[in-house]
Amino acid sequence: MGCLLSTRKDSGGNRRKPGSIGEVSVYVPGLRIPKPVDFAQSLGDYLSKNIVERLSALRTRIVVMASQEGPTITRTKRRSATQHGGSTLADLLHALEAYLPVLMGLVEDGSNLQYKVKFVWVNQEDDAEETAMSNAWYEVLSVLHLMATLLLSQANLLLLPRSSSDGNQPKVTEESIRTSVDIFLKAAGYLDCAVRHVLPQLPPELRRNLPVDLADGVLRALCLQALGQGVDIQLGVAIDSAKATIAVKRRLACEMVKYWQQAQDNIMNLPLANGWGEKHILFVKWKYVEAKAAAYYYHGLILDEGNTEKSHGMAVAALQAADEYFKESKKLCEVFNASPPLSRNPPLWGTMKYLSEKIPKDTLSKVRINRDLYSHERIMETAPTLPDFALALKPDEYQLPSVDPSWRTENIKEGQSGPNS
């Protein structure tokens, strides 16, 4: 049900890893790059010339664009203009969206055509440089993963503070903030569809041999990361809103902790390697600890509103935990940036700009006040448990596209045969 070929990383130079990727607000794994395939040789005996040529043209455009732009897309340069007047990210995404409905014709109703073409992609997080599989569902999975990766790259560009024309401090515009949440939900939708509707189409032996880039745990982690960063944006908006209560901010921060914890749980035991994979794990660790700093800070503020010694003691413990997690997050951030490919922090803004000022200041103040009021024994030495809230942010509902109408109008040649022919 589809042969497998993985090429080890020392076999060639297809995989190009940049030395530096610039500023990072959103982690974007290296782009998996498709390699050319000969549809005419594989499908010429089964499909009309027009269908074969259309598949070839659509995929060749993706191969060319991804090969040329892939190594630069993950760097944080402003989107480059193309001959079509759009951005590289948008053009490649549109090319993938145009290809997918035509590709779906190969897997419709369990067609044996799905086994006729050997699809090859260059990996980034796996130890194997490239993976080839004779199964069109592998191609569908790879396309969805690339679409999600491009959206995460787009979100990263939107969330990097930029200098304004009025000479003020670099900032992220309100429009970019709103747009980024929509992008995170859309990327999460692609990844959720990949996990729930595409992976199950692959036989167990092929699922076991997928590159780690496409492993169930990595896809789930990327989906949860997108949602976690979406909540981070929502928390930043709440911080800037005079109407948002501390309880609302605590809920958002606690939800953010759960998203990042689940993301970490999904990838910690996977063999992520080759720079990109190790950096991926470090990013999740950093953001998980950073989220805990935010959650314990707001939990501490609410506990401090209580009128008992116990609540005040718990508040101090929570704020001290917030301070410790904040310090740890800064160390993890440095480790992440120093891990190849090198990266750096953009200017602080949003949630962490606010909390980087408030956590140390409020913790010191509350600890001093409460220890003046109560004996040391009344101050808890361990942080109280964070409240458990249901996760509100969900991926967009994405469904695989219907088969392109050209499959209905073109005559499929007679003599389709099984996968072992």
Image (tube, rainbow, N blue to C red):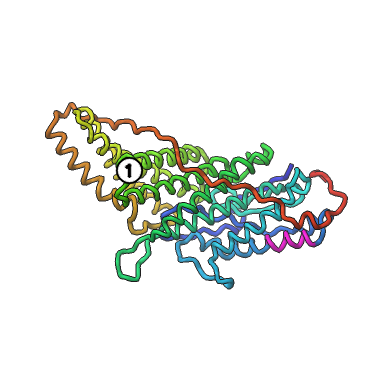
Going by the numbered disc 1, the residue's amino acid type is Ala
Q: Residue at x 68, y 60 (%)?
A: 59
**Residue 93 image position (x, y, % from top left):** 58, 59
Residue positioned most to the left: 372
Is residue 20 among the parts visible in the rendering? no
Q: Residue at x 41, y 55 (%)?
A: 25
Residue 13 as seen in the image, left or right of residue 353: right
Is residue 242 depicted above or below 56 in this figure?
above
Image quadrant assignment for residue 195: top right
Query: Where does the N terminus fall, quadrant-wise?
Result: top right
Q: Which of 337 and 39 is in front in this view?
A: 39
Image quadrant assignment for residue 254: top left
51 in the magenta segment:
yes
Is residue 9 depicted above or below 57 in this figure?
above
208 in the magenta segment:
no
Neighbour tally class for label 1: few under 14, some 14-19, many 20 plus, Cα within 10 Å:
many
| Residue named by callout 1 | 294
Query: Which stretch appears magenta?
Result: 50-59
**Residue 297 image position (x, y, % from top left):** 29, 41
Image quadrant assignment for residue 286: top left
Q: Is mark 1 on a helix, strand or loop?
A: helix
Residue 243 as seen in the image, left or right of residue 124: left
**Residue 110 image position (x, y, % from top left):** 75, 43
